[in-house]
Image (cartoon, grey):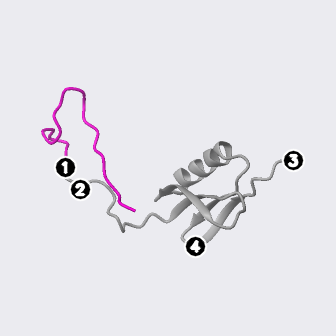
Amino acid sequence: MARTAHQLHPPGEPPGESPRTHGDSSGFPAEREDLPYKVEVWDETGEVVELLVATSKSPAIGYAAYFAATREYPGRAVTLRHRSTVISRWSGKTH
């Protein structure tokens, strides 16, 4: 899976000419930078992670993404992990 970094620019400002622009991809997380919190959405059978919704360095952002994913995918299992440990799990089962 290829990863690309996008930089935002003020309207009318050409890319690369802002004193706040760091060039290529500096200022963005490196591909292997430690982002230990992950939010995963599982397939309908609950056997395979179908979608990685978010990765974060911050536990607060990880939990916010997890909470949003439980609302966005109500019938699916969703997990919040810190590295390999499951912190929270939404079963996706409706009553």
Q: Are marks 4 and 3 in contact (CB under 8 Å)?
A: no
Residue identified by numbered label 3: 95
Query: Which amino acid type corresponds to the residue marked 3 in the rendered image?
Result: His
Which label belongs to residue 26? 2
| Alpha-carbon span between mark 3 and mark 1 | 51 Å
Q: Are marks 1 and 4 in contact (CB under 8 Å)?
A: no
Nearest-to-viewer mark from 3 and 2:
3
Residue identified by numbered label 4: 84
Query: Which amino acid type corresponds to the residue marked 1 in the rendered image?
Result: His
| Mark 3 burial class by Cα count in 10 Å: few <14, some 14-19, many 20+ | few
| Alpha-carbon span between mark 1 and mark 4 | 33 Å
| SS assignment for the magenta stretch, majority | loop
Which label belongs to residue 35? none
- Residue at x-position 70% and y-position 57%: 44
- Residue at x-position 54% and y-position 70%: 83
| Mark 1 burial class by Cα count in 10 Å: few <14, some 14-19, many 20+ | few
Q: Considering only order in the chain, which callout, 4 or 1, is on the residue closer to the N terminus?
A: 1
Q: Are marks 2 and 1 in contact (CB under 8 Å)?
A: yes
Could you say whether the residue bearing mark 1 is in a helix, strand or loop? Answer: loop
Q: Considering only order in the chain, which callout, 4 or 2, is on the residue closer to the N terminus?
A: 2
Q: Considering only order in the chain, which callout, 2 or 3, is on the residue closer to the N terminus?
A: 2
Nearest-to-viewer mark from 4 and 3:
3
| Alpha-carbon span between mark 2 and mark 4 | 28 Å
Residue identified by numbered label 1: 22
The quadrant the N terminus occupies is bottom left
10 is higher (above) or lower (below) than 58: above
Q: Which residues are magenta?
A: 1-21
Q: Closest to the observer: 56 or 95?
A: 95
Q: Position of residue 16 (x, y in %)?
A: 15, 42
